[in-house]
Each structure stands twice: as structure tokens, then as C-alpha cells.
């Protein structure tokens, strides 16, 4: 028998097989130590009728050879593989000569087994004499089939649509589609390698197929997406199945010596009996639902609702209008000052995009920025903002509206972080308008970096090489900030407004802000507090060591025309953090004054030169209490002031055992401490007669 190579590299028979059963009795002889040769399974006509079969097929099907010849080949297969066989038969009639696929064979006892196969056309003298030959690639008995390392071939999107169209066409009951999207799968490839990722995808596909019934179809329809087609399935049943699939995926995968954990989000869309929705629309609805689930927190099931479809339609319409607005230069920039708290000087400004729709009116930035990312317009929007901001900054400096050394900050989207042309655009804009690169700050978010870590991390490093500064925006709202502080050339942290808003009311927010400021000082980066709305916020931030801020305390963002006409940023702005009243001055008693107020008042009195006894008396007279609800004692006040002096006088690296300000009074183990020399302040010690308990 002559042999030839098929498309997968496996040898296939090319002689006249017909009923030569001996050709199918087992694997071809191989040399010692070689991999087992492929085993012939069966041949069939181009219409799908089995012409000849071997012992391997008899073992897979549990049928005698005499009962196999002449039967339709699809009767030997599981329902999930029958459409695949039909696809191959159609391909051969269209001229295909060879290929490879995985078929699931059914045993008469009810079990089934997936087998990797290769197929090739054996040409005859006429179409009726032409045969299709299937061979088993691994040549092993069914019980010895090894685990596949790579992803198993799945129906492509075209085949998936064809099958779903058929299901909808014959449905007299609801049909459901489940879209399974793996969460953060790129991180698996990045941390474990693509080989492990491929094996993981194969394992996930196998788990999904094992969790569904034989009538339900699982198909791979994206890099990390699977679709499940469920006939005769209503919404309740589909939701229950989706929960089972989530549980199946969540079980750890043992790969090599370790375990890999993966989660998924699932979108569910259901078409009623006698549906009016097309297969494409039903898939689109399931895709819309899964992305809504991801936005809501991932690792969950989300069922499509008509409101979601309306939201998608609204986004598409808004994206069309945004594209036109960018082409017509219908957007504008407004600028919010970034202020040095001790002096009130404007040291920079943030460029904020604004859009007034001709019919809808003002569109919130959160809406049209999301639409820009959704529609692929984000890089174009970023380029427009960069060019306009650099141009405006050059004009403002020339007009004397802002100091010569002030900077402008612009936000960069996730899409631009992976755009190779963005660096060239930045360099070109600064060169064209004469703005030094050091006076352009690029703000990025942790979320943007997480979307494609490898590429996104490279751009900030290139930016720093060209002199641009990089700021981490919305710091504290993500989950990988510390790693980025170590690995990225960050020059500024922008403290998220949510922490600033609660600064005077919640002890946790106060502690977090103090920790971030200390952390930034340790790694040598600046801190800008966002969302500062009151003078109290500004004063407390300054006490905590944060000296740069922005927010509504200094008014709303202003357009370029207002800045050129007013020029109010050329002189210091009021920060509300000046010196307070002299020590001992009275103020209304506030019995429920917050923790932050008490600490602020204590430090204010100390700055004004009051001694320990005077500060203690003033705090108690004005109604302040410690967090435990007790009256202030001189020992507690002295300990806090001493701790403040030590933190101001030494770098964090010089104090490996430094502790945070402790509100709890503890017995002293040391004599009264004096402030280290060089602090610019006087020695602090317990006054005569003071209670020494807790004195540090």
C-alpha cells in the first residue's frame, strides 16, 4: 500500500482499501523507541457511509466489524461531533484534500471518547469511488489516550453561527447561548507562559464539555472565550447551567508542580420559541451580557436584559457623534489648578476634556471617555487632548497666566499605552510648541496598565527617557500599586478623591492618607491629593505632609479664554491653611468633634508655641476627646508631639523600628525624650508635675 502525507503530517493510506480489513487491524509497525504510528480507523464515501473499518474502530464503538460497514458514519459519533463530520464532508466536496480534527466516538454501552484524528481524500476513478480515510494520530488504545497539551480544535465562529442558526430554525422551545469569558487570562500567559495557557484552555474546554449535556454544544469563539449553545433551555435552566460552569472553571488546574486558578464571567441570552432574533444578534446579546458582568465585578453570571441592548445602542450612537465631534474640533479643554498648599502658588494644571452635544447637551466625561474606549476612539481623543493641552500651556506661559515652571497634566487611556505612535506624538507636540518635556505630566491608571501589562509598562520607561514625567492616577483604588511603584518610573502619586472626602470624618481614611504620604516620601515621589473641597481638607493634608492638591476649593475647572482674560493664577491662591488663632483662644464647644479635628488642633497649638499644659487644657476646654472618648492628658499630648518631631527629623530609612502615632496610653519604659538636634524646634519634655504614664 502506498503512503502519503496529509495536512497534519500524518501518513494516510492512498491505495484501494474498499473492504481490506487487514489494513485496519492495528498500528503500523514502528522501530523500537519510536512514537506509535497512526492507526487506521475507517474510510467512508463522500456522502458519509462507512466503507471499511478496522479493529480500533470496533473497540471504540463496541460493535463487530460486520455491523459497522455500510452504516452512516455519524451514527458512530457523539452528537457534538456529527456536525464536525458534516463540515469535513462538505469541505472535501469543495476540493479539500486533508486535515485534522478531534472526533468523539460513542460506545454502544453509552460511554464516549474523544480521539485525535487525521483525514485525507483517497481519489478514485469517479466521485462514487472516492473515499475519505480517517486515522488515529496517537495510535494508542482508548484506555491509554494521553492528555492533550494544546487546545483541542473547536468549531470556528462561522461554524458556530451555522449551528446556532440551525438550532433557532428548528426550535419550538427557547434556545439559550452562554458566553464564557475567562477573567484576566492574559495574566496567566504573562506569568506562566503561553504553553501553560494553551494547556489550561484545553482543560477548561474539557471541563465545559463534561458539564453540559450531549445535546449542548461547546465552541471556542475567541482567545479566551467559549460559547455554549443550549436548545430547549429557558432562562432559569440557562442560569443554573451557568452557575455549574462557573464552579467547574473555578476548580484549580494542576499543571506541572503547581496549581493554576482561573475564574470566568458568563453572559446569558435566551431566544424564545419561534424566535425573531438572528443567531448573530443572540451571540451579540450574550457578549453584551458577559461584558456587563465583568464591569459589575467579574466572576459572575449576567443575564441579558433589553436595557443592556438599549445601552449598547446608545453607546454606538454616541460613538458616531463623538467621532464627528473630534473631526469638527467640537470638544474643548478646561483646566483645574494644582496648588502648592504652603504657599498657595499654582504649580501646574490638569487638562480636562469637555463635550457639549448639539442635541443631548453636556455629556459627562465618564460617559464619552467610556464610549471612546468602547469604540476604539480613545487613542484619537488622547492625541487631540495632548496637542491642544501643550498648545494652550505654551500660550498661558507666554501670557504670564501661570508661572514659567508650571506643568500641564494629561490623562492617557489604556489603548494609548500600547500605541507605538503615542511617544512620537508627544515629542512632536512639545517640540512644535516649545514646551519642555519636563513640564508635561502623563497620568495613567493601574487599571489601564493591567489590561496589557507587558506593553503598558514599557511606555512609561520610554517617556522618562525623553524627559516626560509620569503620574499614577486614582492611587489606592486598584490592587497592584506597590508593585508598580517598584517597577515603574513614577514621579507622582495622585491620591484618589474618595480618601480625601472622608479625611475629616473617618479614622481609616486619615490613616490611609498618612500611610500613602509616608510611602511616597520613602520611595521619593510626590503626592497630589485630588478632590480637595474645604479649607479643613487642605489644612489637614498639609499637617500629614501632603503639600500639593487640586479640587473645588480653588473653584471649578476653567476654559482657556477665561484664564487668558482673568490671569488669576499668576498670584498665590488662598489655601485656608494659614496660622490659626493664638494659643489658648476659645472657640465653641463641639462635643462630637472628629478625630482629625482634634489632631489638627493639637498640632496647630504646638506650632503657635503653646506648652504641653496649655495644649492639654485647650483641647479639653474646646470639647475634643481622644478616640477612646477620654479627656486629653498631658502625657498623651507630649507623646504625640514627640512622635511628630522624630518623624520630621529623620528619614524613614533611619528609623527601622519607628512606630505610628499610638492613641493608646502605655506605661513608659524610657525617660522623657528630647527632640533630635537640627529639627528647627525646641526640645519637648514633660512639664513638672505631668503624668509620666505613656511619655515616649
Image: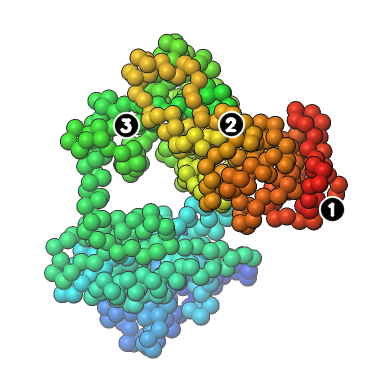
Quarter of the picture holding the N terminus: bottom left
- Measured from the top left, where is residue 613 in percent x and y? 72, 42
Question: In the rendered view, does 663 fall on the left or right side of 475?
Answer: right
Q: Is residue 82 above or below residue 473?
A: below
Q: In front of the other: label 2 or label 1?
A: 2
Q: Is residue 457 visible?
A: no
Question: In the rendered view, does 131 fall on the left or right side of 593?
Answer: left
**Which of the two discs, 2 and 1, labels the residue nearer the N terminus?**
2
Q: Is residue 374 visible?
A: yes
Which of the numbered marks, if any, corresponds to residue 426?
A: none
The residue at 81%/46% (across/down) is: 689
Separation of residues labelled 3 and 2 (CA atoms): 42 Å
Identify the residue position indicated by label 3 in the image: 354
Separation of residues labelled 2 and 1 (CA atoms): 36 Å
Q: Secondary structure at mark 1?
A: loop
Question: In the rendered view, does 646 fall on the left or right side of 254?
Answer: right
How many other residues sit within 10 Å of disc 1, few (<14), some (14-19) or many (≥20)?
A: few
Identify the residue position indicated by label 1 in the image: 669
Marks 1 and 3 close (CB-CB < 8 Å): no
Which of the numbered marks, if any, corresponds to residue 581?
A: 2
Separation of residues labelled 1 and 3 (CA atoms): 60 Å
The residue at 52%/24% (across/down) is: 344
- Measured from the top left, where is residue 396 in percent x and y? 42, 15
- Measured from the top left, where is residue 326 in percent x and y? 28, 29
Marks 2 and 1 close (CB-CB < 8 Å): no
Q: In front of the other: label 1 or label 3?
A: 1
Q: Quadrant of residue 298?
A: bottom left
How many other residues sit within 10 Å of disc 3, few (<14), some (14-19) or many (≥20)?
A: some
The residue at 63%/69% (across/down) is: 33
Amino acid at each position: 500500500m502506498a503512503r502519503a502525507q496529509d495536512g497534519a503530517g500524518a501518513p494516510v493510506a492512498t491505495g484501494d482499501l474498499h473492504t481490506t480489513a487487514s489494513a485496519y487491524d492495528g498500528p503500523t509497525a514502528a522501530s523500537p523507541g519510536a512514537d506509535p504510528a497512526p492507526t487506521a480507523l475507517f474510510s467512508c464515501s463522500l456522502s458519509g457511509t462507512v466503507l471499511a473499518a478496522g479493529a480500533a474502530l470496533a473497540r471504540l464503538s463496541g460493535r463487530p466489524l460486520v455491523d459497522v460497514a455500510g452504516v452512516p458514519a455519524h451514527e458512530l459519533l457523539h452528537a457534538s461531533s456529527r456536525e464536525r463530520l458534516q463540515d469535513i464532508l462538505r469541505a472535501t466536496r469543495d476540493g479539500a484534500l486533508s486535515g485534522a480534527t478531534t472526533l468523539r466516538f460513542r460506545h454502544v454501552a453509552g460511554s464516549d471518547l474523544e480521539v485525535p484524528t487525521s483525514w485525507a481524500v483517497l481519489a478514485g476513478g469517479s466521485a462514487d469511488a472516492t473515499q475519505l480515510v480517517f486515522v488515529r494520530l496517537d495510535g494508542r488504545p482508548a484506555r491509554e489516550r494521553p492528555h492533550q497539551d494544546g487546545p483541542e480544535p473547536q468549531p470556528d465562529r462561522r461554524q458556530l453561527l451555522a449551528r446556532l442558526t440551525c438550532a433557532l430554525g428548528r426550535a419550538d422551545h427557547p434556545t439559550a447561548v452562554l458566553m464564557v469569558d475567562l477573567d484576566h487570562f492574559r495574566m496567566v500567559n504573562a506569568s506562566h507562559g503561553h504553553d501553560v495557557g494553551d494547556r489550561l484552555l484545553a482543560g477548561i474546554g474539557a471541563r465545559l464539555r463534561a458539564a453540559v449535556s450531549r445535546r449542548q454544544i461547546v465552541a471556542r469563539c475567541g482567545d479566551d472565550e467559549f460559547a455554549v449553545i443550549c436548545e430547549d433551555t429557558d432562562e432559569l435552566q440557562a442560569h443554573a447551567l451557568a452557575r455549574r460552569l462557573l464552579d467547574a472553571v473555578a476548580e484549580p488546574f494542576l499543571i506541572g508542580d503547581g496549581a493554576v486558578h482561573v475564574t470566568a464571567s458568563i453572559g446569558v441570552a435566551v431566544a424564545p420559541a419561534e424566535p425573531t432574533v438572528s443567531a448573530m444578534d443572540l451571540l451579540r446579546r450574550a457578549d453584551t451580557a458577559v461584558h456587563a458582568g465583568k464591569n459589575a465585578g467579574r466572576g459572575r453570571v449576567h443575564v441579558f436584559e433589553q436595557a443592556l441592548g438599549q445601552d449598547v445602542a446608545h453607546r454606538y450612537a454616541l460613538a458616531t457623534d463623538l467621532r464627528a465631534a473630534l473631526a469638527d474640533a467640537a470638544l474643548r479643554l478646561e483646566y483645574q489648578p494644582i496648588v502648592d498648599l504652603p504657599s498657595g502658588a499654582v504649580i501646574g494644571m490638569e487638562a480636562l476634556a469637555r463635550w457639549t452635544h448639539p442635541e443631548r447637551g453636556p455629556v459627562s466625561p465618564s460617559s464619552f471617555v467610556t464610549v471612546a474606549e468602547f469604540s476604539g476612539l480613545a487613542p484619537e481623543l488622547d492625541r487631540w487632548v495632548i496637542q491642544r493641552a501643550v498648545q494652550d500651556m505654551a500660550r498661558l506661559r507666554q501670557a504670564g497666566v501661570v508661572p514659567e515652571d508650571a506643568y500641564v497634566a494629561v490623562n492617557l487611556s489604556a489603548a494609548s499605552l500600547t500605541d507605538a505612535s503615542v511617544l512620537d506624538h508627544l515629542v512632536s507636540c512639545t517640540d512644535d510648541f516649545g514646551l519642555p518635556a519636563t513640564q508635561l505630566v502623563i497620568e495613567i491608571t493601574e487599571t489601564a496598565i493591567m489590561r496589557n501589562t507587558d506593553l503598558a509598562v514599557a511606555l512609561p520607561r520610554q517617556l522618562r527617557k525623553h524627559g516626560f514625567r509620569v503620574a499614577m492616577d486614582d492611587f489606592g483604588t486598584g490592587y497592584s500599586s506597590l508593585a508598580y511603584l517598584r517597577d515603574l518610573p513614577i514621579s507622582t502619586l495622585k491620591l484618589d478623591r474618595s480618601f480625601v472626602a472622608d479625611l475629616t470624618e473617618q479614622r481609616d481614611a486619615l490613616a490611609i492618607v498618612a500611610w500613602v504620604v509616608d510611602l511616597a516620601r520613602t520611595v521619593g515621589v510626590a503626592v497630589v491629593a485630588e478632590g480637595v473641597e474645604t479649607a479643613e481638607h487642605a489644612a489637614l493634608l498639609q499637617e500629614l505632609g501632603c503639600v500639593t492638591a487640586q479640587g473645588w476649593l480653588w473653584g471649578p475647572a476653567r476654559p482657556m479664554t477665561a484664564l487668558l482674560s482673568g490671569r488669576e493664577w499668576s498670584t498665590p491662591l488662598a489655601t485656608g491653611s494659614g496660622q490659626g488663632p493664638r494659643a489658648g483662644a476659645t472657640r465653641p464647644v463641639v462635643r462630637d468633634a472628629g478625630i482629625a479635628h482634634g489632631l489638627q488642633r493639637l498640632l496647630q497649638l504646638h506650632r503657635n508655641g503653646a506648652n504641653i499644659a496649655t495644649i492639654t487644657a485647650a483641647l479639653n476646654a474646646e470639647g475634643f476627646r481622644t478616640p477612646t472618648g477620654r479627656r486629653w492628658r498631658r502625657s498623651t499630648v507630649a507623646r504625640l508631639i514627640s512622635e511628630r518631631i522624630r518623624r520630621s527629623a529623620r528619614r524613614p530609612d533611619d528609623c527601622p523600628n519607628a512606630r505610628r502615632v499610638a492613641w493608646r496610653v502605655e506605661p513608659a519604659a524610657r525617660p522623657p525624650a528630647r527632640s533630635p538636634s537640627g529639627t528647627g524646634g525646641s526640645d519637648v519634655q514633660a512639664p513638672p508635675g505631668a503624668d509620666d504614664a505613656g511619655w515616649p
